[in-house]
Amino acid sequence: MSLAWVQHLMLAPVLLPLLCGALLILVNERHHQRKFVINLISTVSLLVVSLVLLQLSDGEFWTDGIGVYLSANWAAPFGVVLLIDRLSAVMLLLTSALALASLVFSMTRWSRIGVHFHSLFQFLLMGINGAFLTNDLFNLFVFFEVMLAASYGLVLHGYNGVRIRAGMQYIVINLIASFFFLIGVALIYATAGTLNMTDLAVRVSTLEADELVLLKVGVTILALAFLTKSAMWPLGFWLPTTYAAASPPVAAMMVLMTKIGVYVVLRLWLLVFSEGAAAGFGFGALLWGGLATLAFGTIGLLASQEPGRMAGYAAVVSSGTLLAAVGYGQPSLIGAALFYLISSTLAVSAFLLLIELIERIRTPSAAMLALTMEAFAVEDSPEEPVGVAIPGALAFLGLSLAGCALVITGLPPLSGFIAKFGLLHALLNPGPGGGSGMVTWVLLVLVVLSGLAGIISLMRFGVRTFWAAKNVTPPRLQLAEVMPVSLLLLLCVMLTVKAGPAMDYLERSAASLHQPETYVQRVLFEPVVLREAIEGERP
Amino acid sequence: MEAILSISIGVMFGSGVWLVLRPRTFQVITGLLLISYAVNLFIFIMGRLSVNLPPLTLGEGVIDPALYADPLPQALVLTAIVIGFATTALFLVVMIGARGLTGTDHVDGKESDK
């Protein structure tokens, strides 16, 4: 094992936003252009880094495609281990792509309705990236807190009555969820004596029966924290209100944050509970919880009139589908579920950004923004976007809305269809480890019904806005607002065109997740770097 | 000692839960504080209860871990205290902001209709 610089590249997704966010605090708010440029450079570099990491994790650079970084050179169960595999690499890429879109969108006005938007944005990225990379439960807690603290600030960004009210609920719920996280971590440490996820997978099989019960209690309490994040019914009532209240770029980033809960559940469960003494624990609860979430999201989607809440319920639906797919416990389902995760995240985020532009049809001047300004008492208010009034703004908005709707509901020809088709295909062709017949049909019917509810709800919104509205005035759009939405939809189109390679990659990710012994081999036997080896390399 | 500690943690956590469910923001934050104390104590005793044992030190030769207190929960609880403290302070700021903007200290931002 050499100390190649590439090995240290794994740290970049955590260190870069940390340093950049800290640097941005020093820059005065008046130089918002400068702040934006620094933030943009950091986000673009993150995108490049995650592309490189994706290449590396799918290549021959690391054994089995799993990169292990022993922080401070402590061997595995004792130190904090960072781990990158295909799944975390693709999640990092998704994060940086979404971040780039949200950031560009925020350029014209949203980043200027409050202070320290850019620093908080970078800290949020640091927390998210760290959560994807770490292999240690307590370290995960720390990254979760970094992410949450930044998100509290961002939800309240542009202080007004609605945001305060929604933000207060959001903060209290997440604070309590964090306490559950801590209780779970403490119980796991008390029984298994380790916090390293891979080491935990090994130690579970050596536990006595009564200790195993206590460990299961600990993992359940821990899971409550993740499931609150991923809005599993009945823990997810905070989500639609918070999404509708947050400013659009922030809401777009929060769509990703619900997926982190799903990611951790997927990783922890497949590592610890896929085989061994406690095999199969909790899969049923995840499955039924996911189904309940799916049903709740479907009903909510039908009932909501406000587009912000519709986006929130669309995110609930996607969380529910994913949790049910994980709980179903069939390896062939996970690849399609990951494809669905990526495509639905992109589409819901694009939809959240788009809503704000569509709202301008109804309220030509940014009345709500002016109110925000007043409450926040910003002296140099950002100038009303003079706007290169883009020709065919209405056509753009209509087409983008149709694109988002197609992906969210899973209609052909975009990536949402491929994702849902993959899910249904895997469900109808049960491989080893599939669920029983009745559950399969319930899941199938709910997935299809949620799509139907999505069509009804989004079509109603589209018809009301574009066709049935009394005075439709073409809104003024700016290039910086159009580009991010187009970028996200373009990514969905690319996912459709390149569906074969993408699906292959995700199936490889899912396959490696189902081999916990590979992780054990890689993490616990990762050799520390010896001093002689470093000195030997020097000329 | 186990019984006393368990009961006190339980009572503290229970009181915290009751306070969090109350309608005033001040009660909510007091509840959160109580819960965080209970959780911190809980993490601390997960290293097992012991009296008069030093934390692990590097001695000569092979040492017997039973003669030392587990240092890891102590490190964990320190981190948890710091993070809990910071997030509670942040919540306090939001609380004051909400009080200023809505003119009431009700968690819904308006008095309930009675």
Image (spheres, rainbow, N blue to C red):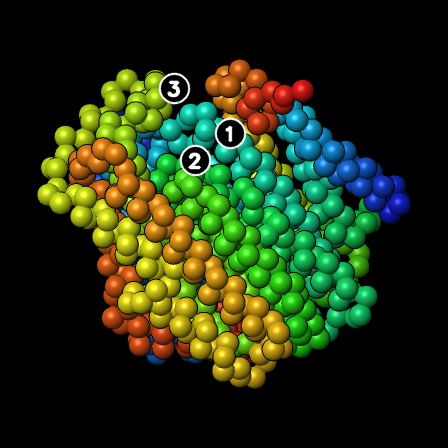
Is A227 or A152 nearer to us in this picture?
Answer: A227
Q: Is residue A191 left or right of residue A78?
A: right
The answer to whether B43 is drawn above or below residue A433 in the figure is: above
Q: What residue type is labelled 1?
A: Arg
What is the number of the mark on residue A245? 2
Q: Is residue A273 visible?
A: yes
Q: What element carries label 1?
A: helix
Q: Name the residue under label 3.
A: A375
Q: Marks 2 and 3, how far apart in space?
A: 15 Å
Label 1 Cα crowd, 10 Å radius (few <14 / some 14-19 / many 20+): many
Q: Is mark 2 on a helix, strand or loop?
A: helix
Q: What residue type is labelled 2?
A: Ala
Is A26 or A264 nearer to us in this picture?
Answer: A264
Rendered-image quadrant of the N terminus of chain B = top right
Label 2 Cα crowd, 10 Å radius (few <14 / some 14-19 / many 20+): many
**Residue in view at x 66 percent, y 72 percent:** A280
Q: Name the residue under label 1.
A: A165
Q: Find residue A8 and report its horizontal and vertical position in percent.
A: 37, 61
Q: Check the residue under mark 2 and report the chain it is in.
A: A
For marks 2 and 3 on the same chain, the one whose residue lies earlier in the sequence: 2
Q: In this view, does A331 lie to the left or right of A487?
A: right
